[in-house]
Image (tube, grey):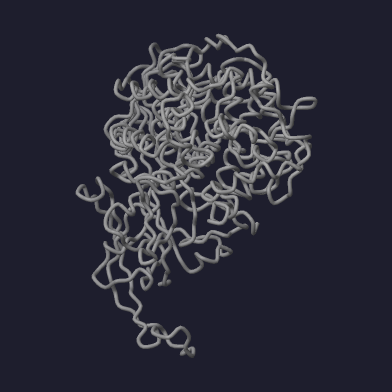
Amino acid sequence: MSDQKAISRREFVSSIAAAAAISSLSGGSPLANAQEAAPSGQTQDVPLTDKPGWKDQGIENLAKSPHAKLRDIPVRAVTIEAGFWARRREINVTKSIPTMHDLLEANGRMNNFLRLAGKSNSPQTGPVFSDSDVYKWTEAVGFVLQSGDRPELREMAEKLIDEVVAVQEPGGYLNTYYQDDRKSLRMLPQTQTTGHELYNMGHMLQGAIAYYRATGDRKMLDAGIRFVDDFLLPNYGPAPKKPIVSGHPEIELALIELYRITGDKRQLDLAGYILGGDSRIELPERRTIYMFSGTPFTARTKMQGHAVRAMYACCGATDYYMETGDDAYWKTLNTLWNDMTSTKMYVTGGVGSRADGEAFGDAYELPNFRAYGESCAAIGNMMWNWRMLAVTGDAKFTDVIERALYNGINSGMSLDGVMYCYRNPLAFDPSTGDKIRNPWYDVTCCPPNLERTFASLPGYFYSTSEDGIYVHLYDDSQLDWHLEDGTGLRITQKTNYPWDGSVEIAVSPAQASEFTFYVRVPGWSDHTEITVNGKALKGITPGAYLPIRRRWMAGDVVRLQMAMKPEVLEANPRVADDLGRVALQRGPLVYCLEGLDQGQGVMLSDVALRVGKPSDGEFQTEYRGDLLDGVVVLHHPGFVAEYGASEELLYSRYSGGAVKTRSVPLTFIPYYAWSNRLATAMQVWTPVLNA
């Protein structure tokens, strides 16, 4: 895909001006002005579902999805208390989201709306997809407010929403890049492939729905409905309507979530039509590979192209399956999942190995220094696996959720909440001049995406099913909700997870009730003990849910003791960059070396581990409350190679002799916490010397 760099999001900004000249794609002559094409009337007060009502809907509203085994619980139903995620989420609310609001304003994102309302003289600023940054920020606030009122954030959001909806056209169209002097480019076939119009609208719908579920305020949601019902549905879709392609998948999952609260099947059908590809827009294969759209989703057999696009397309396709039960989609989704997890996913849960096109590479192409691993792609991986979990209740999807969340996503935001990683490599050399964490990117998709993920986190802890409830994630927390038969239920977790593997879960139904409590046993835990009221249970399998069926009553306690020992991992030998190297994992956390934690003069490029069997005998764990907001570090004996004079030469004659080494202690920190101190070298995969 040699041309992908030219159409990556980072470099797209300068290319859109050419869109008008590329209207030779099939689909007819350039489209008429969209406002003129839309019907004159506006959608008003579309009825929304009241079962469940807006307060009781989860991250997704799966209450009526016929092919979902699990149902989401609302974010407000879980309170995350003192523990691993509590500080992260509080920093997100008090620093990340407010400072991102200020940066969006300072960098002209809101001026794009204000100039259309005659309140700013500033020209359009930022990439073509800049509106989506505003919408993702709004979604983050919506999820925060679902956990409890924050008047200062609510005030910010309401002002922003007023400024957004004020510039919507009478016909429903809303996009600051293509309103005003770029109207002639609006929804041209080429603009659809590169202009992110539908991507922006997808994020607007998601942001509006999250805010509605927090507050009951429909203002932004009604604007999104007007775009869909008054502009999109009457004009685009199967012939005789005009052709449509998502370009950057996002509208698909948003349309389906909108359908779930309106019951308007036209929205679901349009999502399906987009997923099926519109043959009237003829595109070269390399373009449809990169976009992960434009051809039938069910014809895909491997992960390729732009990683974020691929993840969002898979989210939309899984949502479509949950509503329709189309077996062709389910077969394709499993084929793609197996391809990704067995050949193209980093040990951190990150995906997308190539900077060129921000794309998946070939099978086993997982470089470390050159790893892209965009934060948005790891988030997309989590979102997709959440949906696959909802279909199946299979813990293999939860294992990927946890891997991505604790590592490839968590690394994307600094510990102080104001610096962000766009890419997340698995090895780093500061001498290149690269600055991995920054407060702002002109392509600022990742920061508000991270913010909405941390804000929505309580909604990922549990799901309900017809026969009971599933616990997916562990942290100090309290669930106050009910079973699907209406029985009130409180579940309280007490744990120091992920620093140790002990979890105490108090299960308290409102009245004694028989149901199944599905307790997740992580795949990384070789040995897990589970008791109910002190009685040991059997049938415990790593990487599976243990179903505990009994008559539960207040005072019942489930205890888990998961073996939390350092594990030495090796990659498939086809992963060339990791051959002869190992990575360390303890519990859900992947570890790395940072240069400043090692002895003076020790270069990471020269170190190695000597690992015997069993491999955990020489590991020492130490909790450091004074380091990186409190972490467990790992210590292990290592070696530094002493090459002598030959290291000065690029090439030298092979000597055949063993490399001289000296012993050094090595200290590993959790990967998510890297690059939070001085600029220093980092690596996840370390050479190994077999004992």
Residue displayed at 46% across by 32% down: 112
Can I make out residue 507 in this image? no
In this picture, residue 98 sits left or right of residue 65: left
Towards the viewer: 95 or 495: 95
> Which image quadrant for residue 331?
top right
In this picture, residue 112 sits left or right of residue 261: left
Can I make out residue 65 in this image? yes
Residue displayed at 38% across by 12% down: 510
Towards the viewer: 233 or 464: 233
Residue 259 vertical placement versus 357 (above, below)? above
Residue 541 vertical placement versus 532 (above, below)? below
The C terminus: image quadrant: bottom left
Residue displayed at 40% across by 52% down: 590
Q: Please provide percent x and percent y for residue 17.
A: 60, 44
> Which image quadrant for residue 264?
top right
Residue 528 vertical placement versus 325 (above, below)? below
Residue displayed at 52% across by 38% down: 129
